[in-house]
Amino acid sequence: MQRQHAGGCSGGGRVTALGRRIVPLLLACLFAAPAASQTLAPYKDELFAYPAILSSEGKTYRVVDYQEMRDINARDQVPERRVKSNYVSTGVRRVQNDLMLRTPAGPVRHFAVGNTTGASVIVLYLHGQGGSRKQGVDDFTFGGNFNRLKNLMVANGGLYLSPDFTDFGHKGIAQIAALIEHYAAQSPGARVIVACGSMGGALCWGLAHDAATAKRLGGLLLLGSMWDNGFVASPAFARRVPVFFGQGSEDNVFPIDNQEAFFRSILKKKPDYPVRFVRFETGSHGTPIRMTDWRETLNWMLARK
């Protein structure tokens, strides 16, 4: 079987007549403390938790046991195409919409799942080469992991976005930056976390270098993706934006040795930097998209001050 590729302030409520007199105070509170203690409630944790940890350096670096026969063939009804039904809950589609946002960099088609205003947290998934916005909302591929992410966002009052973009260069970065700006303005208390699969990592790193967008970022996830040696000079690094790397040990697109070396270079530059690395032993290029524990990773990022 082929391996699969690729505190006390509340910001979500309606403002009453009394509340209108204290809007400035509320806004100041929202911007000063954007849900630092937020924790996402569980969703099918027992199914999506990591298998055995083969080795670790605390939670900063872990080697996770990955077995194709167990984690694809035994998990999927049709390997790589349709996960077994107990992994998914498709009722979330009722709050999933295919939308268009017009930006100075061009129109951005995107799926939005959950609260487009007043969201508690905003998570974006940016696809890799040959993908589209549809990949990030497919309920049944990648072991149901995107369905879990959608359900986590909806159940916790968040917003999940899966957009198209023109390219992996300056225009694509500008389009995603505009998308983030639009939705962040509708949910000023929300942290914005961006996950990038494969070549989509070029956009993650581009956003990290954009000063305006870096102010919005609450985390970056690089899933079977690339490195950026210039990251340590970026606004996102200066702001200590958390970074998560998920990588298959047999990734033949972005070699794991390069990604691990980059991860280590961040800690060498700043030993207490909020960065984590999960190595899926024997996993291939698309394994991190299937196997990353969204709830654990997002809760770690949301807990950062």
Image (cartoon, rainbow, N blue to C red):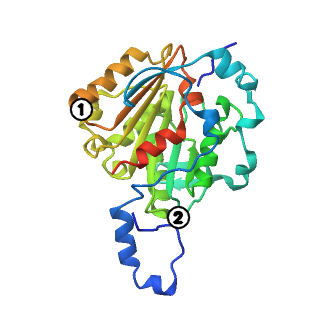
Indicate the secondary structure of the residue bearing disc 2: loop
The residue pinned by badge 2 equals 118
Answer with the quarter of the image where residue 284 lies: top right
Answer with the quarter of the image where residue 203 lies: top left
**Residue drawn where x is 23% and y is 27% of the image:** 268
Q: Please say if the residues under marks 2 and 1 sit with CB atoms less than 8 Å apart.
A: no
The reply to whether residue 158 is in sight is yes
- In percent of width and height, residue 37 lies at 41, 55
- In percent of width and height, residue 91 lies at 74, 50
- Separation of disc 2 and disc 1 at Cα? 35 Å
**Residue drawn where x is 38% and y is 15% of the image:** 257
Q: Residue furthest left?
A: 269
Give 301 or 81, whichever is nearer the viewer.
301
- Residue 293 vs 174, above or below: the answer is above
Residue type marked 1: Pro
197 on left or right of 228: right
- Residue 101 vs 258, above or below: the answer is below
**Residue drawn where x is 52% and y is 82% of the image:** 16
The residue pinned by badge 1 equals 271
**Residue drawn where x is 52% and y is 64% of the image:** 118
